[in-house]
Amino acid sequence: MLFTAVLGAVGFGLLAAAQYFPYLNVTLYNTTAVDTASIYLAPHGGPNEGAYVFDPHGKLLYSIVNRLGHVFDFQPCTYQKHLRYCLLQAGNNNIFNGYGNGIASIYDDHFQLVKGLPTSDYHEFKIKQSFDEATGAVNDIALLTMYNSVRRDLSDFGVPNEDDQGWVVDCHLRALDATSGKVLFDWSALDHVPLSEGLVQPTGAISGYTSQFAWDYFHMNSIARLGGGDYIVSSRHTSTIYCISGKDGSIVWRLGGKSSTFQLQGFEFSSQHDVRVINDAGNTMRLSFFDNAYNTFTPPQGDSSGKIVELNTATKTARLVQQYNPPEAGFQSGDGGSLQLLPNGNVFICWGSTPYVTEHTADGVLVYSAYYAAMGSSVSSYRAFKAPYTGITNPK
């Protein structure tokens, strides 16, 4: 059954979709197959930036607009055993080139701030629970990306400067105790990944000539934590997924890029976002991610897509399990994007700089699509999520 509807929202009420964004222009390809959870969206790049919750039909359930600055991530999370809402907000300074100051915030269901954690970036913020075998306690661990501009000799990359020192972005993976703020683990890309792995060379807004326009050779955009304490890191500008030892920070393996540990069988990917671990058992690991196939600096490698891949650490091979294609050709998302596995087995995809969200069955059949702004507009959502909605009361 094909059903299309448009509902619009702004501020704290419903208004005409033609006048404001975001709105959801929904197409249901199979009503019975669509997951019934709500959609969490954080559009930016237009006049009504903020955090929104819609039901699958496009009805506005909640919005807080133009009071949070640039919101790059909005999702339910668990903190101190309670349902909370985690947001990544861009700070007021140093917002440029896709990175800068950020604010990692946890809100309650009255949208009052419960906890704020310092960060110098706004690509990743999630809270994961970790069981402490010694004490039996369940600890909340915050995973954050950190970006800092530092001096480096970049003359080999065509960046002459005073004393042969240019500027490069050093991306950090940081794990914190979410309650105390204590740093549990910190990993620097510059300490472990050579500049030569970068596939995006110094140019234009990342020329490397000043701290503001530092060369972003790595561009970390997602972090996942394995049960054993290791980490999975996604690097957009090396087109590589890294497994990082949680003990000493060494690189356990690389997937993709110039120095892949694995032979990729039947697929390629580049400039990926939102790498998640589906399972990790024995010699096999399944990962999901959004394959941008484009980064705005180099020519597109094809249409963006969602992917699930399986790694075999014994044979050092990686195979494509399933690919999720866009509703139509021409989806080339230069930044952002996410892929979420839903409880009913479906897959929910945010198409990053292409203002669409879609839902697919496990085997790739499109059952739902919705756009919240015009194609080609400046409006986008870094990620989007589906989750039950129990109600939020706006702050006074």
Image (tube, rainbow, N blue to C red):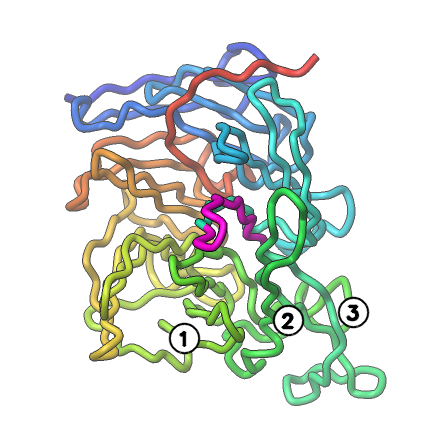
**Residue hosting label 2:** 203
Quadrant of residue 379 within the rendered picture: top right
**Closer to the eye: label 3 or 2:** 3
Q: Position of residue 346 (x, y in %)?
A: 23, 38
Mark 3 and mark 2 lie on one chain; the one further toward the N terminus is 2
Callout 2 secondary element? loop
Q: CA distance from mark 1 to mark 3?
A: 27 Å
Q: CA distance from mark 3 to mark 2?
A: 12 Å
Dot 2 crowding, Cα within 10 Å, few <14, some 14–19, many 20+: some
Q: Residue at x 53, y 73 (%)?
A: 249
Tell me the kind of residue under disc 1.
Gly
**Residue hosting label 1:** 257
Residue nearest the viewer, comparing 192 with 91: 192
**Closer to the eye: label 1 or 3:** 1
Could you tell whether 154 is left or right of 378 in the image? right
Quadrant of the rendering where the N terminus is positioned: top left
Tell me the kind of residue under disc 3.
Thr
Could you tell whether 227 is left or right of 46 in the image? left
Q: Is residue 281 above or below residue 44?
A: below
Q: Which residues are magenta?
A: 132-144
Could you tell whether 211 is left or right of 234 in the image? right
Q: Position of residue 53 (x, y in %)?
A: 47, 23
Q: Residue at x 31, y 36 (%)?
A: 358
